């Protein structure tokens, strides 16, 4: 194991294995500096700090004051420039300390349907008595949230991100930054909390699938259109088959009666991929997803048949989640492994 690890490190250091684009090289360097983990403690190695736009203007002002003081030999201007410079240096320490020592931990994410926002749970904890102020958290392209950790030691958040398609959603790195207290500097970090959201297909509004008229075998419900068991007699109606007429009853009572047979209807529903010919893959999955939701509140058991996957009929929240998971991961890496084909 040690030999393999050392070999892997040498491969990463070899420029032949490095990405050629600046963006790719940045990602490799960032993965080394801030590796993916479900719990991160911020310190000097994973917090970056740089002057903000306001900070650059402030530094330019200090430079102008120093030039003016040198030109006019004015000690008061020298004092003002040095005072502003010391303020800038103190701001560096305070801005960095506003992130340093903070612990960010992944707190789970619930499955959502395509087109909804997945809310990734976070737990922020401070270890020192000092608070953390004006923290901005958000995913790239999403509106960030502003958090203050003053009196409470721990705070839980839910950071939303749009889930456009089914499957596993990895939103990338979370951006955490602050410009507190003076806005002269910006301290930030990029966090990969190693969690992904399961996104179900976008459900199409549809009722449960059509149930067959009857099914032979071990059913529960007796219907009168079957041919298995004798149920009783009923008055003759025009169009009834002559072979079903009860001639003995007619001979005894003089009234035409028809023998009625029944069967046991199978109350188990099968949500079958093959029942939706002509539709695209995503439309089939969306329709099946709508069927699962329609069947969830009923009393009947329902199962799912996909290419290579068959989940036996059942009921309940766990069964519903199992079917939706199979639909979400159909045809994707990490395909549903709990079903028997």
Image (tube, rainbow, N blue to C red):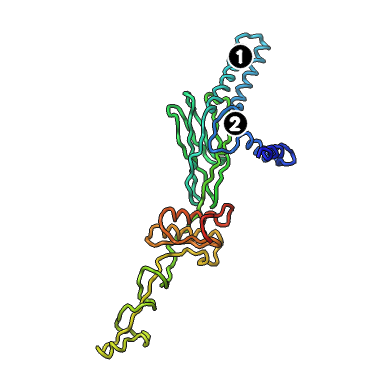
Can see residue 239?
no
Q: Which mark is residue 272?
A: none
Along the line of sight, which residue is nearer the eye, 177 or 292? 292
Residue for point 51% across, 55% down: 338
Residue for point 41% across, 61% down: 301
Report which quarter residue 174 is drawn in.
Answer: top right
Along the line of sight, which residue is nearer the eye, 273 or 283? 273
| Residue corresponding to mark 2 | 46
What percent of the width, then of the height, locates residue 114? Answer: 51, 51
How many marks on residues? 2
Is label 2 in a helix, a strand or a loop? Answer: loop
Q: Is residue 185 above or below residue 108?
A: above
Q: Is residue 150 above or below residue 204?
A: above
**Lateral position of residue 85 relative to residue 130, left or right:** right
Is label 1 in a helix, a strand or a loop? Answer: helix
* Residue density around tag 2, few if under 14, some if 14–19, many if 20 or more, within 10 Å: some
Can see residue 328?
yes
Give the residue at the far bottom of this rendering.
251
What percent of the width, then of the height, locates residue 267? Answer: 39, 66
The residues tagged by marks 2 and 1 sit, at their Cα atoms, a distance apart of: 31 Å
Quarter of the N terminus within the rendering: top right
Please report whichever mark, 2 or 1, sits nearer to the chain's N-terminal start: 2
Report which quarter residue 15 is drawn in.
Answer: top right
| Residue corresponding to mark 1 | 82
Give the residue at the far right of this rendering.
16
* Residue density around tag 1, few if under 14, some if 14–19, many if 20 or more, within 10 Å: some
What percent of the width, then of the height, locates residue 278? Answer: 55, 66
**Lateral position of residue 266 relative to residue 71, left or right:** left
Q: Is residue 7 above or below residue 279?
A: above
In front: label 2 or label 1: 2
What percent of the width, then of the height, locates residue 314? Answer: 42, 59
């Amino acid at each position: 194991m040690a030999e393999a690890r050392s070999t892997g490190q040498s491969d990463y250091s070899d420029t032949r294995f490095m990405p050629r684009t600046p963006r790719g090289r940045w990602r490799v360097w960032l993965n080394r500096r801030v590796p993916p983990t479900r719990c991160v403690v911020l310190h000097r190695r994973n917090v970056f700090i740089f002057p903000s736009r306001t900070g650059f203007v402030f530094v330019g002002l200090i430079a102008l004051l120093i030039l003016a003081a040198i030109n006019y030999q004015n000690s008061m201007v020298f004092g003002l420039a040095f005072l502003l410079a010391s303020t800038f240096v103190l701001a560096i320490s305070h801005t960095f300390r506003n992130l340093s020592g903070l612990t960010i931990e992944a707190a789970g994410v619930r499955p959502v349907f395509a087109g909804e926002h997945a809310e990734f749970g976070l737990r922020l904890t401070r270890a020192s008595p000092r608070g953390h102020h004006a923290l901005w958290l958000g995913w790239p392209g999403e509106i960030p949230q502003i958090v203050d950790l003053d009196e409470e030691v721990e705070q839980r958040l839910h950071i939303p991100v749009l889930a456009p398609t089914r499957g596993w959603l990895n939103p990338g790195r979370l951006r955490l930054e602050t410009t507190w207290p003076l806005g002269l500097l910006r301290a930030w970090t990029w966090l990969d909390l190693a969690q992904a959201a399961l996104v179900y297909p976008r459900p199409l509004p549809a009722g449960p699938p059509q149930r067959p008229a009857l099914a032979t075998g071990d059913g529960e419900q007796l219907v009168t259109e079957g041919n298995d068991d004798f149920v009783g007699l009923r008055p003759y109606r025009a169009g009834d088959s002559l072979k079903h007429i009860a001639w003995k009853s007619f001979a005894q009572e003089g009234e035409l009666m028809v023998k009625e047979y029944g069967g046991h209807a199978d109350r188990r529903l099968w949500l079958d991929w093959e029942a939706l010919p002509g539709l695209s893959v995503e439309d089939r999955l969306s329709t099946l997803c709508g069927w699962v939701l329609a069947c969830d509140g009923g009393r009947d058991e329902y199962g799912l048949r996909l290419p290579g996957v068959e989940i036996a009929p059942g009921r309940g929240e766990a069964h519903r989640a199992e079917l939706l998971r199979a639909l979400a991961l159909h045809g994707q890496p990490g395909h549903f492994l709990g079903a028997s084909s």
